[in-house]
Amino acid sequence: MAFSLLPREDEYFAFFSQMSAKIQDAAQLLVQMVEDDDSKFEHYYLKIKKTENSCDELTHKITTKLNKSFVTPFDREDIYELSVALDDVCDYIDAAARAILIYDIRGLTEHARSLAEIMYRLAVQIHGSVSILNKPNDINRYIVEIHRLENEADDVYFRAIGELFRKEENPITLIKWKELYEILENATDRCESVANIIESIVLKHS
C-alpha cells in the first residue's frame, strides 16, 4: 500500500528508521547497564547520551526538512508528531540511565531489569514498524505487540511500586527508586504513543 501517487520526498522514512535504530541501540545499552557492574554505569550512560544526541539531531533534520518540503508522504503534523514521539522515547531511556548514575542507585532490582528488558523489546518492535511505514501491509503485528508489551510493563511497574512502599523504610531511597521506576514506565508509555501515531497515519492513508 502506497500513501500517495503524487511526487513526494521519501527521505522522511529513512530519518524515522534511523531514529528507531538509535532507540533500539539506546535501549540495548540500558539493558547492559542494569545487568553490569555499577562501576561501569558512567561508561554506559555516556554511550546512551551520545545516542540520544544523535536522535535529537535527526529530529532537527526532520523539522528543517518539513519547513522546506513542498509535498510530504503524509500530513506534516503527523510527521512532526511521530518524530517528537520517537525522540521522547530516547529521551526517557537517557533519563533512566542518568537517574541510575546521579542518584547512585546500586543493587538494581529484578523489576528494574525487567522494565529495561521490556523497553528493549518495545524498541525492536518500534524499529520494525517504522522500517515498513512506507509499505505498511504487515504493520499491525508490530502495533499489537507494542500494546501487549506496554501492558506487561504496566504490570511490572505496579508490582515494583507496591513492593517498594511495603518494604523500603528509608524515605530518600524510596524517592530514588520511585523516580527510576516512573521514568522507565514513562518510556514504555511513550512507545505505545508511537504505536498509536503510526496506526493513525496508516488508517488515514489506507
Image (cartoon, rainbow, N blue to C red):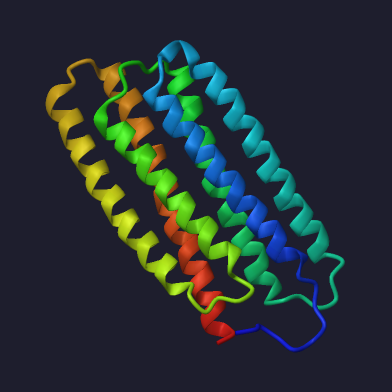
Residue 170 coordinates in the image, percent (x, y): 22, 15
Q: Within the image, what quadrant is residue 91 found in?
A: top right
Image coordinates of residue 56 in percent, x first then y, are 69, 44
Residue 164 screen position, x and y as percent: 20, 29
Residue appearing at x 75%, y 50% in the figure: 60
**Camera-side residue of 58 and 17:** 17
Q: Where, by quadrant of the figure, is residue 31 drawn?
A: top left
Residue at point 70%, 52% (across, down): 59
* Residue 89 in picture, x, y percent from top left: 52, 47
Does 120 sit above or below residue 17?
A: above
- Looking at the image, which residue is at 27% across and 26% down? 109
69 on left or right of 32: right
Quarter holding the C terminus is bottom right
Seen in the image, is 178 located left or right of residue 31?
Answer: left
Farthest left residue? Answer: 166
Q: How many circles with numbers are drawn on the protein? A: 0
- Looking at the image, which is closer to me, 17 or 161? 17
**Residue at 47% from the left image edge and 52% from the top image edge:** 124
Please tell me whether residue 138 is drawn above or below residue 154 in the rendered image: below
Where does the N terminus fall, quadrant-wise? bottom right
* Left or right relative to 8: residue 108: left
In depth, the one of 58 and 140 nearer the eye is: 140
